[in-house]
Image (cartoon, rainbow, N blue to C red):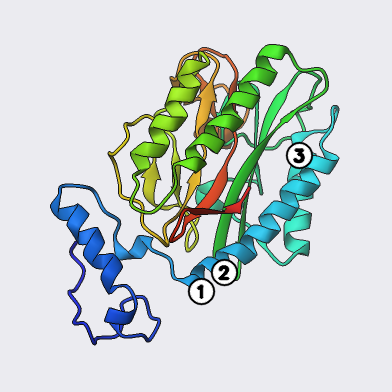
Amino acid sequence: MSEKKLGRNDPCWCGSQKKYKHCHMEMDEQIDRFRREGHTVPTRQMIKTPEQIEGIRQSSRINIAVLDLVAQKIHEGMTTEEIDKIVYEETTRLGGIPAPLNYEGFPKSVCTSVNNQVCHGIPSEKVVLRSGDIINVDVSTICNGYFSDSSRMFCIGEVSEEAKQLVQVSKECVELGLKEVKPWGFLGDIAQAVSDHAHKNGYTVVREIGGHGVGLAFHEDPWVGYVGRRGTDMLLVPGMVFTIEPMINQGSYHVKLDTHADTAAGQDWIVITSDGKLSSQWEITVAVTEDGAEVLTY
């Protein structure tokens, strides 16, 4: 670690006003033991305080409520632009701000990724949901400066058994990844649980895009990949907050930008499968606790 070394009686770095020995000293010593063993460890900036996690919880309540409303209203024949309108109006009604809107040029309040779109699908009046479609609705919220992020899959009308199976397995991948979240575990534990289950069912896991830290900004460290081995990658410690959001493909794990999208923004943002086959993704935000994990957003 490059952080300043504190004395036992110095104020803790977290801002709690407690003496270091009564706050994070014991945890920091344990982190340092892992660092000396050669493991990648989180910086202090990746560790949220209880007050910050409470702020993320408040943002998460809006995020969950918005996705619940989408779940009630989504239906065959609606456009993804209508989903965007629902997300914007409900988020702002509840006192939040849609985090995607104008983020690095993204033009809408939500990502709506249909069928072979892996992520960052842009809502449009031209995209009408048809029976047989699967769609990921990815909602992210800012409330009082705190960020939350989650997504859900929806099956529209009569969906093929193959598509239903992909959606179900991708949800199970998140659930199995969540079971691996505990203090003094590793991000690689999550990755192996996810990839093993996907591969066992004949699917692949997108490699270029993964989860991320979240809370004080939309995207923070660490990056969370889903192709790895147990006992590797970054150490998990209490206070870390990140997303679990593996993108599970029906065919190849290769992805590409949709250069044939009908807008410049679409060509810059929309990621599709390289072979045109389906992709599915669920996303939750979790906090590492003293004895496991807390799901903040789903």
**Quarter containing the N terminus:** bottom left
| Vertical comparison of 222 with 238: above or below | above
Sequence order check, earlier mark of 3 and 1: 1
Tell me the SS state at disc 1.
helix
Which mark is nearer the camera, 3 or 2?
A: 2
Sequence order check, earlier mark of 3 and 2: 2
Name the residue furthest front.
291
Q: What residue do we see at 44% from left, 47% from top?
A: 181
Amino acid marked by disc 3: Glu
Q: CA distance from mark 3 to mark 1?
A: 36 Å
Side of 173 where 254 appears, left or right: left
Q: What residue do we see at 36% from left, 50% from top?
A: 222
Residue under label 3: 81
Amino acid marked by disc 1: Glu
Q: Position of residue 266 (x, y in %)?
A: 58, 33
Q: Is residue 277 visible?
A: yes
Side of 239 where 37 appears, left or right: left
Tell me the SS state at disc 2.
helix
Sort mark 2 into few (<14), some (14-19) or many (20+) by Cα contacts within 10 Å: some
Which mark is nearer the camera, 3 or 1?
A: 1
Q: Position of residue 283 (x, y in %)?
A: 57, 41
Residue under label 1: 51
Indicate which disc residue 55 carries: 2
Residue 21 location, quadrant: bottom left
Residue 230 location, quadrant: top left
Side of 208 where 202 appears, left or right: right
Q: CA distance from mark 3 to mark 2?
A: 30 Å
Tell me the SS state at disc 3.
helix
